[in-house]
Image (cartoon, rainbow, N blue to C red):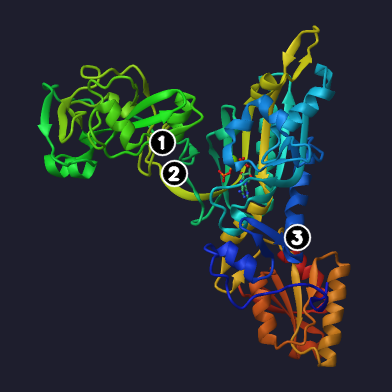
Amino acid sequence: MRATEYLIPTLREIPAEAEVVSHRLLMKAGFIRKAASGIYTLLPLGHRVLLKITRIIREEMDCQGGQEILLPIIQPAELWLESGRWEVYGPELFRLKDRHGRDFCLGPTHEEIITELVRGDVRSYKQLPQLLYQIQNKYRDERRPRFGLLRGREFVMKDLYSFDRDEDGLETSYQKMIVAYNRVFSRCGVEFRLVEADSGPIGGNVSHEFMVLAGSGEALILYCPNGDCGYAANVEKAESRVVEPENKDESRALELVKTPDKRTVEDVTAFLGVGPERIVKTLLYETERGLYAALIRGDRELNEVKLQNLIGAVHLEMAGPETVERVTGAPVGFTGPVGLEGVDLVVDEEVAFMVNCITGANRADAHYQYVNPGRDFPIERVADVRLVREGDPCPHCNRPLVAARGIEVGQVFKLGTKYSEAMGLTYLDEQGQERLVVMGCYGIGVTRTMAAAVEQNHDEQGIIWPAALAPFTVVVVPVNVRDEIQAALAETAYATLREGGLDVLLDDRAERPGVKFKDADLVGYPLRVTVGKTAGDGLVELRVRRTGETRLVSVGELVESVRAFL
Ligand code: ATP
Ligand code: MG
C-alpha cells in the first residue's frame, strides 16, 4: 500500500472525551471514528488490525476442531422468552419490532439461537461433540459505554459454543478452549492472566476470564504471588481464607449504648473508641425473593455478586430509607440483626467468628455492644459474601493476595444444562435414552483486544503494535520523495518487502520527513525503513519502533533483517 492512496487520517488534536490511552491513540492515529456513543467505524488501519486478530482466532479455533458458522444478529423474542432471558437481560438488550409488531432483539450473545439450531439438527450421540463458533458484531446497550473500543454498544466478538454428551465431554471442550485462548492471547503479544470468574447473567457455574493486565482496566483481580499456587480470581469471585481466632474474649452481656446521630462505621468507631473490625454492618437488600440483611465486618465491603448468587436473585438493590424504617423501626444507620424480623439474615463467615461486637440496635441513635453471633441473632446462613482485598490470605496457600487491574478480553463458561433444559435440547444415547446436551460457551472481545493491546503497548509518541497485530509490519519512508535516488530506492525496498511476503506501507507523501516520522511513531508500525542520505550506496536505515534502535542495511538484506526481528 502507498500512503498517498490510503486513508490514514491522523489528528493533531486529541478528542476531549477520550479518557483512556487506547481511545485517544486509536482516534488520533486514524484507526477508528465514532458514529454514536459506543458505536465506532473501523477505518482501513483499524480494520487491518481486526483481520489480524480474527485470523489468529480462526486458526486457533479450527485447530481445536471449531467449525465456523454465522448466526443471525436479529433474534426472535420467542427464543429469549423460552430461556427466560427476555426479562432477565433488562435494558442492556436492544429490542425492536418488525412491521407486524413482533418482538426481536439484536444479539448481545447467542446461546438461545444456537441452542435452537442444534436442537433442530442434532439427534444422536453420534453427532456429539460439536464446537461451533462465529465472529460477529454483538449489541449491548451498555449503561456506560466508554473508553472507545473497550466498552462499546456494538462490538466484535468471537463466540464459540460446545455441545457434549456429558460433563466429562464438557470438561474436555472447556480445556480445549483454555488452550486455544492461551495461544490466541500469547500470539497477539499481550500480557495476560487467566482468572477464576463469576458467571453472571450468562449462567452456569464454572467460569474463567482472560485478563490483559493494564492500569486502566475496569476489572480488579487478585492473585497469589506464590507461583506454585497460582490462584487468581476476578474480585467478584475472589475468596480468602478465614481463620477462627484462637484466643477469643469471654462473651459479655448485651448492652445498649446511646450513639446520637452516629450512623456510619467511622462515626461509631470514633465515638466508641474502637476499631472498625469490632463493628458488624447490617446491609438491607430488596430482591424479588424478599428482603435480606447481609452482615459484614465493619472494615469490609460486601460483595453484591456473591450475595446475589447465594440468594439466586435476579434483582438485588439496597433498601431505600423508607424500607429501612418500616422494617427496622429506625432510620438508616442504626440497623442491626438483634431482634430483626421479616428479613433473611446472611452472615459472612468472618462475622460468625466474632465476639462482643457492635451492631445497630434498630432504634434511632442507639447501638448494641457485646453482641454475640448465635446468641443474640441466628447464624443459620453463614456464607462468604465479602469483597476480598489485597493482603487477604490466599484461599489455597494463605499467602497475602496481590491486586492488579485488568481488561477482560475473554471469558469461558461451563453452562451445563441451563439452556438445554430450558429449551429442550436433547439427544439419544447408545441405549436410545433421551438425555440433555451439556453446553459451554466461550467469548473473545475482538475489538476490545485491539484496544487492550494499545493500552499495554504505547509510549508518548504513539502506539507500538505487537508485530502480530500491526496493520503494517514495516513502513518505508523516503526522506525526500523529490530526490530521484531516494525515491527509486524506496520503491525497490517497498517491492522487495512485498515480494518477501511482508505487510508494508510506502509513505510516498511529499511531506517533511519530521511529519512522516511522527506519523509512523503515532500509528505504531513495529519497523521503519528510512531511505535518506545513504541511498546512493543502496543502504537504508532499519529502525525498531519499540526500542528506537537503528541499523544500516542494504536493500538486499532487508527481508532477512525484518524476518529476524519478527
Ligand atoms: P464486561 O464484564 O466487561 O461487561 P461481559 O462479562 O459482560 O463483559 P461476556 O458476556 O463475557 O462480557 O462477553 C465476552 C467478551 O466480549 C468479553 O470477555 C469482552 O472481551 C467482550 N465484551 C463484552 N462486552 C463488551 C463491550 N461492551 N465492548 C467491547 N467488548 C465487550
Ligand atoms: Mg465476561
The relative height of residue 257 versus residue 120 in the rendered view (above or below) is: below
For label 1, the residue is 303
How packed mark 3 is, by other alpha carbons closer than 10 Å (few <14, some 14-19, many 20 or more), is some
Toward the viewer: 1 or 525? 1
For label 3, the residue is 47
The relative height of residue 37 versus residue 120 in the rendered view (above or below) is: below
In the displayed structure image, the side of residue 463 where residue 216 appears, left or right: left
Location of residue 425 in the rendering, given as x and y in whole percent from the top left corner: 74, 20
Q: Quadrant of ligand 2?
A: top right
Toward the viewer: 382 or 103? 103
Location of residue 384 in the rendering, given as x and y in whole percent from the top left corner: 39, 28
Q: CA distance from mark 1 to mark 2?
A: 23 Å
Foreground: disc 3 or disc 2: 3
In the displayed structure image, the side of residue 488 where residue 215 appears, left or right: left
Residue at left offset 76%, top offset 68%: 562
First in residue order: circle 1 vs circle 2: 2
How packed mark 1 is, by other alpha carbons closer than 10 Å (few <14, some 14-19, many 20 or more), is some
Location of residue 134 in the rendering, given as x and y in whole percent from the top left corner: 77, 41
> What SS does tag 3 mark?
helix
First in residue order: circle 3 vs circle 1: 3
For label 2, the residue is 225
> What SS does tag 2 mark?
loop
Q: Does the CB distance between marks 3 and 1 fall below 8 Å?
A: no
Residue 546 appearing in the image: no
Q: Amino acid at mark 2?
A: Pro
Q: Amino acid at mark 1?
A: Asn
Q: Is mark 1 within 8 Å of ligand 1?
A: no
The answer to which image quadrant residue 418 occupies is top right
